[in-house]
Image (cartoon, rainbow, N blue to C red):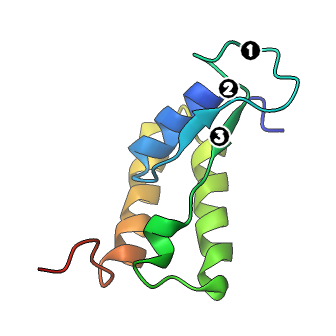
């Protein structure tokens, strides 16, 4: 528990260029518009070539973004790390 709502985590992670969705958790005491959790999907990153060994990096980036949710400078630095990780892994190939 990081003492952050799903909505605030979703916003912070978005600033860090990490896309997640706020999501209710079992026995959630927050409304569906706020939520207590987030939903992390892996198809977008596995399709781009990330493997099991990359997931620790992804988890660390998510953790750092949530810890620094109120720090836009830190979130910008995290977004640069995300860009570095994904720069050679294009989402669409045409």
**Quarter of the figure with the C terminus:** bottom left
Is residue 36 shown left or right of residue 92? right
Label 3 near label 2: C-beta < 8 Å?
Answer: no
Q: Which residue is mark 3?
A: 38
Label 1 near label 2: C-beta < 8 Å?
Answer: yes
Q: Residues within 10 Å of mark 3 (few under 14, many from 20)?
A: some
For residue 24, say whether it is visible: yes
Q: Nearer the viewer, mark 2 or mark 3?
A: 3
Give the mark nearer the N terminus: 2 vs 1: 2
For residue 73, say whether it is visible: no
**Quarter of the figure with the N terminus:** top right
Give the mark nearer the N terminus: 1 vs 3: 1
Q: Residue furthest left?
A: 94
Q: Secondary structure at mark 2?
A: loop
Q: Position of residue 12 (x, y in %)?
A: 50, 38
Residues under labels 1 and 3: Cα distance? 13 Å
Q: Which residue is mark 2?
A: 5
Residue at (65, 87) in percent of width and height: 53
Give the mark nearer the N terminus: 2 vs 3: 2
Q: Residue furthest right?
A: 27
**Against 13, is 63 above or below?**
below
Residue 73 falls in image quadrant:
top left
Q: Position of residue 70 (x, y in %)?
A: 54, 31
Residues under labels 2 and 1: Cα distance? 8 Å
């Amino acid at each position: 528990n990081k003492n952050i709502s799903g909505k605030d985590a979703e916003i912070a992670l978005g600033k860090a260029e990490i896309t997640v969705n706020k999501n209710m958790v079992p026995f959630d005491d927050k409304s569906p518009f706020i939520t207590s959790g987030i939903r992390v999907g892996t198809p977008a990153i596995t399709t781009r070539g990330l493997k099991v060994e990359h997931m620790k990096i992804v988890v660390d980036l998510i953790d750092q973004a949530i810890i620094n949710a109120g720090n836009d400078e830190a979130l910008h630095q995290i977004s640069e790390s995300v860009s570095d990780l994904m720069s050679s892994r294009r989402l669409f190939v045409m």
